Amino acid sequence: MPIAPAIPTTPAERLRWALSDAWVVSGRELIHWVRNPVVILNTLLFPLIMVLLFGYVFGSAMRVAGGGDYREFLMPGMFGQTMVFGVISTVYVVAANAARGVTDRFRSMPVSSFGVLMGRVIADMLTSTLDLVILMLCGLLVGWRAHHGLGSALAAAGLLLLLRFALVWVGICMGLRLTPEGAGAAWMPLFPLTLLANTFVSPELMPAWLRIIAEWNPLSATVQACRELFGSPGLSGGSWAAEHAIELAIGWPLLITVIFLPLSIRRYRRLNR
């Protein structure tokens, strides 16, 4: 008879167990991603289409507060929007796994619940990193540059991925509560979130009440911080949020993670109750 695996007892053993399970689950998710050519094609083409659409079609009628090239202003906003829109795939995959019984099979096995969820996080972070690299290459083709050097560019990329990491937990929490059909509509609240920010328009050009909303949007903090680190035009000022964008770009994702990480684990453990 097969011998049941020993249950970890010490914190170090439980951590190794969770990390091992997370690596196996993330590998499973990445295999599904690689074997789906439509997803890969969307990953390659969608950033290019978005850059061309906003940079050359809409951008011809846009201006940047304080002057500067609109496409250089636009690219940090596009980076941030891509990180936010990644939530849609997280919500859908998690909801689909739950509906198809994949999640129930994981829960019936001696697998760490945190490891299963962390595997989803690792897979999403790897694909989001690829999305960001492709989008940055598209930006270079249309004239965007990181004017403050490699170190600042890597710091900006880190802030973007930190936002994505926090939003993965939001996506997991939502996906465990929605059906696949409901998950397909996840883009509806996200789209206004990316518009009520500094992604495409400088807050200085907005009405006063809307400017306050845009400046305190968590996405705006990340985008503003990236513009500072990249040396892009369109830096806003005059408010506490605008002048402390880097601090908020770290604080907002940490707050979101602190809230939604335990909620996701709790929801996973209480499924079907």
Image: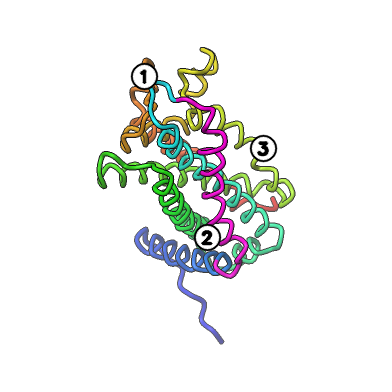
Residue behind mark 1: 237
Residue sitting farthest toward the right: 181
Going by the image, does 143 lie left or right of 192?
left
Residue 84: % across, % down: 52, 42
Q: Are marks 2 and 1 in contact (CB under 8 Å)?
A: no
Magenta stretch, overall SS = helix
- In the image, residue 100 above or below residue 47: below
Residue tagged by mark 3?
A: 188
Marks 2,3: beta carbons within 8 A? no
Q: Which residue is mark 2?
A: 116
- On the image, the x and y values in percent for residue 156 come to 34, 41
Hey, what amino acid is under mark 3?
Answer: Met
Q: How many marks?
A: 3
What amino acid is at disc 2? Val
Q: CA distance from mark 2 to mark 3?
A: 27 Å
Q: Is residue 138 above or below residue 12?
A: above
Residue located farthest toward the top when viewing the structure as drawn:
208
Q: Residue, x 58% and y 56% (percent of image)? A: 42
Residue 177 visible in rendering = yes
Range of magenta residues: 34-63
Label annotation for residue 45: none
User: Can residue 265 be seen?
Assistant: no
Mark 3 or 1, nearer chain start: 3
Q: Position of residue 166 (x, y in %)?
A: 47, 43
Residue displayed at 60% across by 47% down: 88
